[in-house]
Structure formats: C-alpha cells, structure tokens
Amino acid sequence: MSASATAGPRRAGGISGTAVGLTILAAALLVAILGPMLVPHDPLVQELAARNAPPDALHWLGRDHLGRDILARLAAGTRISLAVALGATLLAVLVGAGLGLAAEALGRWPSFLVFGAFDMVRALPSILLALTLMVALGVGMAPLILALGIAFAPHMALVARAAWRRESAAGYVAAARVMGAAPLATLRRHVLPNIAGALVTQASIIMPRAITTESVLSFFGLGVAPETPSWGRMISGATRFAEAAPHAVLAPVLALCLVTLGFALAGDRLRLALDPLRERGQ
Amino acid sequence: MSLAMRAGLGLARQAMLLAGIAIAVFLLIRIVPGDVVDSMALEGSLDEEAIAQLRADLGLDAGTLTQFGIWAGRVLQGDFGNSLRFDMPVADLILAAVPTTIGLATLALAFGMALGIGLATAAVLWPRSVLPALVEALNLWSIALPTFCLGLGSILLFSVGLGWLPVIEQWLSPVAILGLDIAGQVAKPLHEDLKEAATAAHIRTARAKGLSPARIVLRHLLPNALTTVVALGGLILAGMIGGALTMEVLFGLPGLGTLAFQAVSGRDYPVIQAVVLVFAAGVVLVNWLADLAQRALDPRLRR
C-alpha cells in the first residue's frame, strides 16, 4: 500500500467514489427540485382499496398503508428532507460559526460564556436534544429546522474555533490588529475567507446527519406535521405494516441510505480539496 | 499540575455544565404553552377546584424560581417526582430502564472496540493483505450507513423476511449494528496512528535488533496508540448513546430510549426531564473519565 493510495479519494474498479457520490447527490437534488413533475400521481391522494398494494406497471413502487403512491411520496419527501437538512445546516453555520467566531474575536469572557453554552448543548446526544426541543416547540417544518440547527450548532462552533485559532496564529491577523482593525472587521474581512473551507467541510458532515435525525424524529412522531410526506414520516407510517408491505418501508430507507452514502463519498473529496493542511495539486 | 488536581478541576467544570443543563431543561419545559394540568383538564372532566388543587400539589402555582428551587432540591435527593402516565415515581422507572441501556452500550462498545482495535492491529502487521482495505471499507460503512437505516433493514430482513426468533434478534442486531459502527470509527484513526508510529526511531531500533513484527506491534506500538483509542472511546460512546436510544425503540428493548420515547409521545414532562438529566450526567461522566484516563495513560499530557 503506497501512501497516495490511502490518502487519495476512494476508488473501486476505476470509478472514483467521488463521481458516484456526486451523481447520487445531483440526482437527489434534481428530484427535490422537479419532484412532483416527475411522477404522475399525487402524494396525498388515498386509495383505500389499494392499501399496501405491491409494485405494478402504474405504481412502480407500490402503494402504502393508506393506498398512496410510494414513488410520488418519495419524490415529494426528497424535497422536504433536503430542505429541512439544508435549513438546519445553514442555521447551524449561522448560530455555531457566527456566534462562536464573534465570541472568540471579542475576547476571553464572551468566548467562555458562549462555548460554555455550546458545551451544555453538546453534553446531550443530538437525538435527545432535538427530541426535547421538539416537545417544547411542537411539530412542523420551522420547529424541526430550529431544533436540528441548535443541536448541530456546537459542532460547527468547535470547528470554527479551531480554524480561527489556527489562523490567528498566522502573521496577517497580528498585522491587522497592529494596524488597528476592529476585531469583528478582522474576522469578517481577513479570517472568514480563510476558514470557509473548514466550515463547508463540516457542513457536508452535518447535512446527512440532519437528514437522518429528521427521519428518526419523525419516527418518534415529532418531525414534520404528520400528513407531510417526509422520508421519516413514510418510514414511521409504514413500519406498523412491515409484514404486509415491506416495500413501503424499504423505499424510504433505501433513499435515506443512498443520500447519506452520496454525502459520504462526495464529502471525502471535499475534505481533501478544502483541507488547508494538505499540499495543493496532488 | 498534579493528576488529582486536574481531576478535581475537571469534575468541578463538568458539575457546572450539569447544573446549567438542569436549569435549561427546567426552563425548556416551562416554555411549553399550557402545563400538564391543562392537558389533563382537556382530556378528563376536572372542575375548577380540582384543577387548583392539582396545581398546588404539583407546585405549579408558585413562581418559577421557587419551583426550580423545590425541583432542584428534590432532584439532588434522587426524587424526580411522579410520572404523569404511569403513576409511579420517575426514579423507579429510570432505575428499571438503566440496566438495559448500560447493557446494550457495554456490549456494543466491547464488540466494536475489540473488532476495531483487532482489525487495525492486524492491518499493520499484514500491510499487504486485504486487511487495510477492510479498515477503509468499514470506515466508509460507518460514515455512510446510519444505524437507524441498518436497524430498520435488519428488522425487515430477519424478523419480517426470515421470521427469526425476536428475542435473539432483539439483542443481536442492535449490538452488531452499533458495534460495527464503533469499529469503523475506531479502526481507521488507530490504523493511521499505528502506521505513523511505526516510522519512529525506537521502532526502527527494535526492528534492527531483530524483534518480531508481532512483538513490535503489541509491545511497542499499541500501548502508545492507546491514548487515541481512549480519546476516541469517550467521543464515540457519547455519540453512540444517541444511536442506542433509537435502537431500543426499534427493537423494543425496555431501556432509557424507550422510556424517553414513551414520555415524549405521552407528554410526560417529569420523565422527559429526568431522562435528559440522566443522559447528560452519563455523557458528562464519560467525558471526564476519558479525559482522566487519557492523562493517566499519556505522560506527555500531564505537563
């Protein structure tokens, strides 16, 4: 095993994992945008006579326990699951990196307080934290995004702080300080562009976890509103009828696995490309 | 700074964290519009007098600060109040659920660590075999496949598809799924660590004087890499607890996760508060122990 083989992106049989990952993600994004246009059925229309019907020529993935078309729900769910994950990740970046960096730039005490709060959040498993927040906030898209964003913010804050500390040891931050630049201005103008890579990388780790957590929360009956066709709601609705209609569980579970796999494969390359400690051009 | 002093300071910091979490949890439940008595009044036919009586009994008519004082005082004595759904002391419910959760976590951790450490060590010993690729594959497995998906897949395959005995499936699947996840997270960093350590001067000396590769790895490399394992172990255990919680609900194991699930769906606030606090205390304790063990194992960190 040469060093480059283990350090480079994953490869199997000449096809790079990155290409596979990016293809999966692009397909998921396409389905999320086009969603309803791709499938000729309504994800909400129930046909009780065809409950748990297996796949046929008209309904490619079959029907669920209320006779709704699974493919249509899967497509609609892609949009919702991706939107929730994107919203939660953006919120985690804003709250985690924003608050963390501002506190760190402002000095010792703000940093102590803010990171103390983040440590508290971090002491709870993210599932349990989001669960508790959802109990307080109620179900729905906005509470869900808020709960997931808060749950993942500390991870972002820690990455941002580590990157900021590495950068502030560099000469240009000291130079800006000597020239009398305000701390927050230094942060925005000089440091932020340099640590953006680390933040994007962390975001690529948080996204799939947010998608999974959404599903688990919905499984617990707490995610989006019950009638909304998210992957988690599809799974939780179908598990009670797993004996009669395993295909209704399998479809959203596979979609979930596929997207997390896509993030894992594509994120690998992203980490390599954006890692400032790695030599460029290899 | 001495180890004992470090330990004391660390413990004080973790206790402060826990106190902060207790306050946050208490306030969070108070944010919920309408209290328990409201929801009970909606369901049953309580008259005004009974409602006022119930509020007084539960201490809901006092100010928030007084309520917190009373609640915190009781919690410190191990009294989490009564469950609203089960009409039982919350502490009893928790005590009944803890062994299952600890058992699941311990089994998964033991299996995962043994597999991860064993695989990484073997991969260093036989670098030209298939083992290093296996380390990579296992790592991708744990990054790419959420334990939630694997749990559901396993239920579909074994319980629904093959009709296996649920009792075996109930424990075997969660332990295997969580364990593989842990092994994937441990094996890769440990493997990298061992490979890097193998280039050190004292290893070259050991090799030059003719020690066998197995002896070099087991006696000289692995002890030094243990700090990596312990540091990872603390992090992984904290992360795995979330997964264990989901596994319990999926496979119907009567642990803290199932208790939390029931409490959340029944809006059983005293139980939710208690479960969150117990989990937080567990994670805080594990972090403290991991930090301590790391310092005890690695003299370089004691400075």
Image (tube, rainbow, N blue to C red):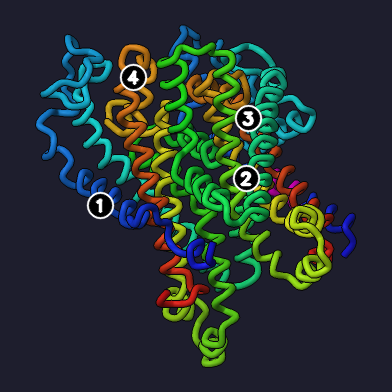
The amino acid pointed to by label 3 is Val
The amino acid pointed to by label 4 is Pro
- Pick whichever of labels 1 and 4 is earlier in the sequence: 1
The amino acid pointed to by label 1 is Ala
Crowding at mark 1 (Cα within 10 Å: few <14, some 14-19, many 20+): few
- Pick whichever of labels 3 and 2 is earlier in the sequence: 2
Residue bearing mark 1: A26
Q: CA distance from mark 3 to mark 4?
A: 33 Å
The amino acid pointed to by label 2 is Ile
Chain of the residue under label 1? A
Q: Residue at x 39, y 45 (%)?
A: A261
Name the mark nearer the viewer: 3 or 4: 4
Residue A101: x %, y % from top left: 52, 67
Quarter holding the N terminus of chain B is bottom right
| Same chain check for tags 2 and 1 | no
Residue bearing mark 4: A246
Q: Quadrant of residue B104?
A: top right
- Is label 3 in contact with label 2 (beta carbons under 8 Å)? no
Magenta range is B13-19
Q: Is residue B293 above or below residue A59?
A: below
